[in-house]
Amino acid sequence: MPALSRRDLARAAALAALGRLGSESALAQRALAGFNAPPDTVWLNANENPDGLCPVALAAVQEALPASFRYHYREWREHSAAIGRSAGVAGDQVLVGSGSSEILCAAVHAFTAPDRPLIYMQPTFELPVTLAQALGRQTVPVPLASAWAADVKRLREEAAKARGGLIYLCNPNNPTSSLTPKAGLDWLIANLPPNTVVLVDEAYLDFAHGPQAASALDHVRAGREVVVTRTFSKIYGMAGLRIGFGCAKRDLIDRMAPYVAGVIAYPSLRAALAALGDTRLLPERRARCQRVRAGLVGWLDAQGYQCIEPHANFVMIDVKRNARQVIQAMVERGVAPGRPFPPLDNMLRVTLGTETEMAKFKKVFLEVVRG
Ligand SMILES: Cc1ncc(COP(=O)(O)O)c(C=O)c1O
């Protein structure tokens, strides 16, 4: 058996780390594993969407199952083109993955190096940071600025100091649900130091609205050093089907492509394409999210609790004490909110569920915080 190279060992360590930590939902479930959740627990811990698959997507899965003994490679180009059209880019500017997680990981592999760190806002979605650390890359946290937006000046400064790197910017951000306004994003992308790529994670952008909630896709179309990731896990309600994609100019796609498997489950692909054809889905779901979100924020305010202004399908609440005990007490009463997110120790993240689930959340929240 040939000896393993240092590179092989680093890769094995990275994969092992991913196996241990994995996706947001794996992290979320793991964090609650020691708690005693009753069988009828309401799970508001992983930013999933209770709307689930829309009817056309469900029908597409059922129709695709009998044809799933093939890989369907010959249709691949056509599928990438259709996904690209939905984002306003060409098919060869799209990389489809097993969730957007696979694309985030591919970007870390492709655009960090021993002398090119991962620079990220803190706190944020941990997956890219975990992988970069497992690969032995330098990781540079940059605390969020005022109004919980990314500190674009400092992100740029750190990239310039390192003479290049990968800047990870999650917009809206997880776990804070906060937005980095369009002007900040545009400034960062217009002022990138050499050898720097920006990875903009737009997993939750479809839940946001207003002129500040701008996609970075315009910058991809303009040929900038930007990768934008999108997912079908959130507003489309398909987290378990594992499909997401990245958009970037061709040379960036070519550099990421070796790090993805290059094929995903056929029913997932068919479901995603069917959902993209449902023109009412996004506006309806966005409106429902906004209604439930505004209802929760107003209710919290009336109870004397503040939250970070939310732009995604979850809300970060200041519980005015260490959230760890609140989480445990809530889980024991059948409502599972998000895990702790240090250093925001007094904050509780709750995913927006159905009206019924939110009613249970409110009841249990009050029981726990009023002790
Ligand atoms: C900010 C962010 N990006 C990406 C993902 C990964 O999602 P998926 O791999 O299901 O597309 C998540 C999951 O919760 C997330 O919160």
Image: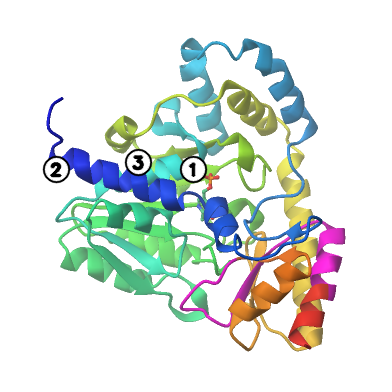
Q: Nearer the viewer, mark 2 or mark 3?
A: 2
Residue named by callout 3 = 106
Give the x, y percent position of residue 20.
43, 51
**Secondary element type, mark 1:** helix
Which one is earlier in the sequence, the residue at label 2 or at label 1? 2
Instruction: Report the residue marked by disc 2.
Output: 6
Q: Position of residue 110 (x, y in %)?
A: 27, 42
Going from the N terminus, do you reach mark 2 or mark 3 first?
2
The secondary element bearing badge 2 is classed as helix
Magenta stretch encompasses residue 26? no
Cα–Cα gap, marks 2 and 3:
19 Å
Q: CA distance from mark 2 to mark 1?
A: 28 Å
Q: Which mark is residue 100?
A: 1
The residue under the point 75% across, 65% down is: 335
Region rendered in magenta: 339-363
Mark 3 belongs to which amino acid?
Ala
Q: Residue at x 36, y 50 (%)?
A: 17
Q: Helix, strand, or loop for circle 3?
A: helix
The mark that comes first in sequence, 3 or 1, is 1
Would the CB of label 1 be found within 8 Å of ligand 1?
yes
